C-alpha cells in the first residue's frame, strides 16, 4: 500500500473499504469527451474526426477508471466534473482493449480538489437491485437496475472470456461506462446495452486487470485456444473407453486463434481444469458464483504464461497435463481479429484496391459479407498461408477497363507469387514474368484470372490517385 494526500491507493490488492468515503456521485463521477480518428474500412484512405462521450469514476489519486470502448484512435481527451462546463485535458495512462479497461489521469492539480475515490466491490451480487449513475445535462441521473444473471461471457472489445453481469433497467442510451453501485461499492461499468438489458463489466474482473497492469512486466490476459464438443451423449465418451457420465468435454480443434499450446490433443476429454471438475456441458462450480462456463477459467485466477493443471482422458486412461496459458493476441491467426489505434491497411495499384482480410473489414461489411469471405474467415488455416488479401474494389479507369465490377474477391497469386499480405503484392508487382501482370484469385471465386499491362501500371496508379483525390496509394 502507499498513501498520497490521505488517500490509500491499491497496488496489487484493493484498498480496504474504510479508506473510502460514503458514495457521493458528484465528487467521484466524471464526464469524458474523446476526440478520435475514425476509419471506414470500405474506403480505407479516408480519415474522419469523431467524438465519443462516456463516463469515468475516480478509484484513486490520479486514477480515473473507464472502459476502453471509444478510445481507439483518440488524440484528445477532456473531462468535466461536478456537472459544470469547464473541461480538463486528460492523459491516457494505459488502455487494455482485450479487457475493455482503461485508466486516465488529469495532470492539472485543480481538478482533484474536492474529488473522492470509490471502492471496487470484491464480490459481485447475484440478485437484488443496483443503482446506475451518470452525468446528464449537468445533473446526476440515477436509475435502478435489477440483476438478471452473472455468467462467463465474451468481452465487447475482444474474444476473451470473463465474468459478465447483466441487469435490467429503464435507463436510455446507455452502455458508455455508466457506473453501477451496490450501496457504496462500485459493482462495475456498463459495456453495452440492448433495449432494457445492460451488460456490466464486473469490478472483480476490473480489479484483476488493474493489478496485472501494476506489475513491472504485464503478462497480459490468457485465452483457451481450443474448441470442444459437449460430452452429453453417452456414446461419445463410451467410444473413448470412459465409463463416467455427465462429466467432461471433447477437444475438437486446437489453435484456432493462432495462440495454441502443445499440452492438449484433438480427441482429449477434459475432466478438470485448475482443480475444478468439468461437467458434460463444459461448466464448473465456482466457489463464489456457482455454475459457470469453463471458458472463464482462463481469466479467473491466472495471467498469460502461467501453467494451469488439466486432468484429461487420453489413450484409455486419466492423465494430467500442464496447459501454458497463451497470451491473447489480435494479430495471430489467419484472420487478425481486431485492430486498435492503427489505421486500416490498403494498397492501390492500377486502381485495384487491395486490403488484408481481417475482423474490422468483415465487421464493416456487416450483413453484406460475400459467402466465400465468410467461409474463409471461419477457417483455421488455408494451405499454410499466414494471411489472406482481398481485392476489395476497383477505381474505374481506362487502364482497368472491364474489371470495374470486381468486389471483395480473394487473391491467390500475382505473377506466380502466393499472396499472404500487402508486402507480397508489392514484391510480386516488381517482378512481372512477362509484359503483363497476371492476377489469380482463389479457385472458388467466380472470376479466376485478370491481366493488366505491367508497363503502364505506375502511370495509371498516379493518374487514378490524382483523379480520385486519394492522398496516398498505400497504408501498410
Image (cartoon, grey):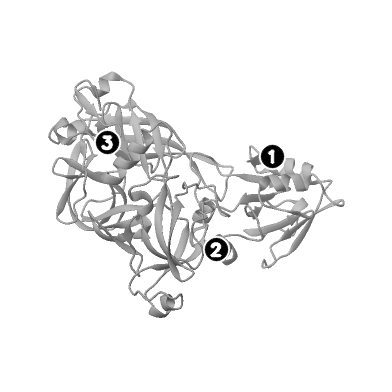
Q: Position of residue 147 (x, y in %)?
A: 20, 56
Which residue is tagged 2? 374
Q: Quadrant of residue 393?
A: bottom right
Asked whether the viewer can see residue 154, the reply is: no
Q: Are marks 1 and 2 in contact (CB under 8 Å)?
A: no
Residue that mark 1 sits on: 466
Q: CA distance from mark 3 to mark 2?
A: 44 Å
Which of labels 1 and 3 is toward the front? 3
User: Can you say which quadrant of the picture contains the N terminus?
Assistant: top left
**Residue at 72% over, 48% down:** 425
Q: Is residue 286 above or below residue 222?
A: below
Q: Quadrant of residue 407?
A: bottom right
Whichever of callouts 1 and 3 sits on the residue coming sooner in the sequence is: 3
In the visual, does 27 lie left or right of 336? left
Q: Which residue is mark 3?
A: 13
What's the residue at 65%, 41% (across, down)? 474
Q: Determine whether the residue tagged by mark 3 lies in a helix, strand or loop.
A: loop
Whether tag 3 and tag 2 are in contact, CB under 8 A, the answer is no
Local crowd at mark 3 within 10 Å, few (<14), some, or many (≥20)?
A: few
Q: Does residue 103 appear anywhere in the picture?
A: yes
Left or right position of 221 against 418: left
Amino acid at each position: 500500500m502507499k498513501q498520497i494526500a490521505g488517500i490509500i491507493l491499491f497496488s496489487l490488492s484493493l484498498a480496504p473499504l474504510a479508506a473510502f468515503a460514503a458514495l457521493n456521485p458528484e465528487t467521484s463521477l466524471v464526464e469524458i469527451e474523446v476526440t478520435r480518428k475514425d476509419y471506414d474500412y470500405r474506403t480505407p484512405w479516408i480519415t474522419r474526426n469523431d467524438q465519443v462521450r462516456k463516463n469515468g469514476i475516480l478509484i484513486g489519486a490520479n486514477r480515473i477508471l473507464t472502459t476502453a470502448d471509444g478510445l481507439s484512435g483518440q488524440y484528445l481527451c477532456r473531462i468535466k466534473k461536478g456537472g459544470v462546463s469547464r473541461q480538463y485535458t486528460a492523459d491516457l495512462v494505459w488502455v487494455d482493449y482485450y479487457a475493455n479497461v482503461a485508466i486516465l489521469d488529469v495532470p492539472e492539480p485543480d481538478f482533484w480538489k474536492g474529488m473522492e475515490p470509490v471502492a471496487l466491490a470484491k464480490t459481485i451480487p447475484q440478485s437484488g437491485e443496483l443503482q446506475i449513475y451518470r452525468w446528464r445535462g449537468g445533473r446526476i441521473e440515477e436509475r435502478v437496475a435489477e440483476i438478471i444473471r452473472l455468467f462467463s461471457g465474451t468481452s465487447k472489445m475482444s474474444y476473451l472470456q470473463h465474468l459478465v453481469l447483466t441487469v435490467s433497467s429503464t435507463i436510455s442510451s446507455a452502455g458508455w461506462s455508466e457506473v453501477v453501485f451496490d450501496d457504496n461499492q462500485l459493482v462495475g461499468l456498463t459495456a453495452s446495452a440492448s433495449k432494457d438489458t445492460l451488460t456490466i463489466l464486473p469490478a472483480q474482473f476490473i480489479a484483476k486487470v488493474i493489478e496485472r497492469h501494476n506489475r513491472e512486466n504485464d503478462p497480459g490476459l490468457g485465452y483457451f485456444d481450443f474448441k470442444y464438443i459437449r460430452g452429453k451423449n453417452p456414446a461419445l465418451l463410451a467410444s473413448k473407453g470412459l465409463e463416467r457420465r455427465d462429466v467432461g468435454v471433447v477437444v475438437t480443434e486446437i489453435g484456432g486463434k493462432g495462440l495454441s499450446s502443445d499440452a492438449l490433443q484433438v480427441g482429449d476429454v477434459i475432466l478438470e481444469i485448475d482443480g475444478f471438475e468439468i461437467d458434460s456441458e463444459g461448466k464448473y462450480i465456482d466457489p463464489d458464483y456457482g455454475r459457470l462456463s469453463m471458458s472463464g477459467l482462463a481469466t479467473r485466477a491466472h495471467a498469460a504464461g502461467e501453467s494451469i493443471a488439466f486432468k484429461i482422458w487420453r489413450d484409455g486412461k486419466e492423465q494430467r497435463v500442464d496447459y501454458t496459458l497463451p497470451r491473447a493476441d489480435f494479430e495471430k491467426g489467419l484472420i487478425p481479429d481486431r485492430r486498435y489505434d492503427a489505421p486500416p491497411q490498403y494498397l492501390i495499384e492500377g486502381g485495384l484496391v487491395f486490403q488484408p482480410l481481417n475482423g474490422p473489414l468483415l465487421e464493416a461489411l456487416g450483413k453484406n459479407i460475400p459467402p466465400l469471405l465468410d467461409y474463409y474467415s471461419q477457417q483455421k488455416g488455408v494451405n499454410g498461408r499466414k494471411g489472406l488479401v482481398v481485392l476489395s474494389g476497383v477505381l474505374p479507369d481506362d487502364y482497368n477497363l472491364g474489371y470495374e465490377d470486381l468486389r471483395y474477391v480473394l487473391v491467390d497469386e500475382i505473377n506466380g507469387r502466393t499472396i499472404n499480405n500487402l508486402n507480397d503484392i508489392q514484391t510480386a508487382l516488381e517482378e512481372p514474368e512477362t509484359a503483363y501482370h497476371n492476377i489469380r484469385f482463389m479457385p472458388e471465386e467466380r472470376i479466376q484470372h485478370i491481366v493488366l499491362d505491367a508497363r503502364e501500371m505506375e502511370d495509371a496508379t498516379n493518374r487514378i490517385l490524382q483523379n480520385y483525390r486519394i492522398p496516398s496509394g498505400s497504408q501498410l
